[in-house]
Image (tube, rainbow, N blue to C red):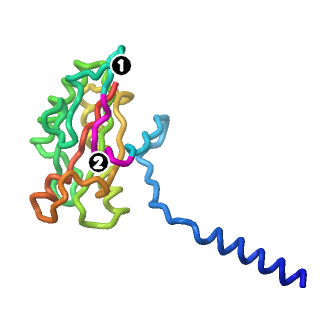
């Protein structure tokens, strides 16, 4: 009787442990060598929102804010072709301007976020978003931005800017977005 009771308890424990929730895979976008850890994703309800920059008194620094679309802020999004992580001439020109702005604001820290459209698997798009964020970050570093002021993270297809299911929406979602903070 004691053996049967022990077996029932053991099976119950195994069943309870095996019924945990599946979590999405974590993807590291750190490069080999010394680097800072990747910041955690933004809290629920702030999808795609930028970090609010603060001055020394805790007030928002107006010229460092940009909206989630990348429009109207100091650092506009750069866009990519389907299934590519190559910077176009237009993207390079935009990033040249970004490098000047970042260098003129020495306390600004920038999180480069790689995004994809909804096509493809979660894993594939996380990897593609990582390549987009890294190539963007690397270009800014090549233009004189200190690497320590830039971090790169991939959100893959998990944070679309535009919810549509057409080519125009897909094109807007294939981007590197810039979250600015102090």
Is 48 one of the magenta-colored residues?
Answer: yes
Horizontal side of 88 relative to 176 (left or right) equals: left
Residue 99: x and y in percent read 21, 28
User: What's the CA distance linking mark 2 and mark 1?
Assistant: 29 Å
Q: Is residue 120 visible?
A: yes
Q: Is residue 8 left or right of residue 167?
A: right
> Which mark, residue 75?
none
Q: At which x and y percent is residue 74? A: 18, 29
Bounds of the magenta segment:
44-52
Observer-nearest of 74 and 95: 74
Decide: few, some or many residues near mark 2? Use Cα within 10 Å; few <14, some 14-19, many ≥20: many
Which residue was labeled with disc 2? 114
**Mark 1 and mark 2 in contact (Cβ < 8 Å)?**
no
Q: Earlier in the sequence, mark 2 or mark 1?
A: 1
Q: Is residue 142 magenta?
A: no
- Residue at x 15% of width, y 55% of height: 81
Residue 71 quadrant: top left
Please state if 82 lies on the left or on the right of 36 as rendered.
left
- Position of residue 85 measured from the top left corner of the image (x, y, whole percent): 23, 51
Categorize mark 1 by other alpha carbons within 10 Å: few (<14), some (14-19), many (20+). Answer: few
Q: Secondary structure at mark 2?
A: strand
Tell us which disc is closer to us: 2 or 1: 1
Residue 176, relative to residue 65: is it above or below?
A: below
In the rendered view, does 121 fall on the left or right side of 37?
A: left
Residue 29: x and y in percent read 41, 47
Residue at which label 1 appears: 58
Q: What residue is rendered at 24% in x and 63% in y?
A: 118
- Depicted 114 relative to depicted 148: above or below: below
């Amino acid at each position: 009787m004691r053996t049967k009771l022990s077996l029932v308890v053991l099976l119950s424990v195994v069943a309870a442990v095996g019924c945990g929730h599946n979590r999405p895979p974590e993807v590291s976008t750190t490069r080999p060598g010394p680097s800072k850890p990747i910041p955690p994703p933004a809290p629920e309800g702030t999808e795609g929102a930028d970090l609010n920059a603060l001055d020394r008194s805790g007030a928002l620094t107006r010229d460092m804010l940009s909206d989630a679309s990348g429009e109207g802020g100091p650092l506009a999004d750069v866009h990519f072709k389907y299934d590519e992580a190559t910077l176009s001439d237009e993207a390079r020109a935009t990033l040249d301007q970004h490098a000047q702005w970042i260098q003129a604001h020495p306390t600004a820290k920038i999180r480069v976020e790689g995004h994809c459209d909804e096509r493809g698997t979660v894993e594939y798009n996380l990897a593609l978003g990582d390549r987009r964020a890294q190539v963007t970050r690397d270009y800014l570093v090549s233009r004189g931005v200190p690497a320590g002021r830039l971090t790169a993270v991939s959100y893959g297809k998990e944070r679309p800017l535009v919810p549509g299911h057409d080519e125009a929406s897909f094109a807007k979602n294939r981007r590197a977005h810039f979250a600015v903070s102090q």
